[in-house]
Amino acid sequence: MKKTVKILTAIMLLITITFIATTVFAQSGGYINPTELTGTQVTTEQIQNIGNTIIGIIQAVGSIIAVAVLLVIGIKYMMGSAEEKAEYKKTLLPYVVGAIILLFASNIVAAIFNLFGNA
């Protein structure tokens, strides 16, 4: 039961990442001129730079949090009893999967964009 919940959670996380990526790169039915909305010329490169900056900040903050959580789990593992060590080993797998997804999120988004963006 717990294994099924973990697998479903991972699948839902991947689906969420996919929908976020397609929403970011989606285009409405017609062309909207950014100059009409803001009064200034906004280029695609500027929008991509803003997106890259946001992804970079999320990755940096997420990496710092991931390292901090790993330190806490590691210290608790070293100080814990045999039963506690077994429990920490169980919590380590979802943590590692989440950290890998976080660290490679920009690559995942870029792959999805290249797959569907050029169609």
Image (cartoon, grey):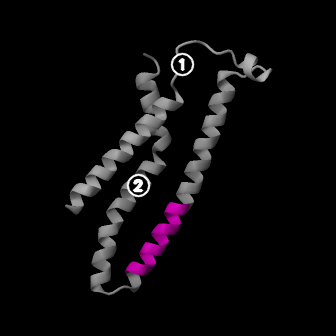
Circle 2: residue type: Gly
Quarter in which the N terminus is drawn? bottom left
Q: Position of residue 118 (x, y in %)?
A: 46, 18
Magenta-tinted stretch: 65-77
Would you name the residue on which mark 2 appears?
98
Would you name the residue on which mark 1 appears?
28
Q: Which residue is situated farthest in the top direction here?
A: 30
Secondary structure mostly taken by the magenta-highlighted segment of the chain = helix
Q: Mark 1 and mark 2 in contact (Cβ < 8 Å)?
A: no
Query: Badge 1 local density, few (<14 within 10 Å), some, or many (20+)?
Result: few
Determine whether 110 is above or below 10 in the image: above
Residue at 28%, 50% (x, y): give it.
8
Does residue 75 belong to the magenta stretch?
yes
User: In the rendered view, does 1 fall on the left or right side of 29?
Assistant: left
Q: Position of residue 57 (x, y in %)?
A: 62, 48
Quarter in which the C terminus is drawn? top left
Query: Badge 2 local density, few (<14 within 10 Å), some, or many (20+)?
Result: some
Question: How far apart are the two marked residues, 2 and 1, measured between alpha carbons?
Answer: 32 Å
Image-quadrant location for residue 51: top right
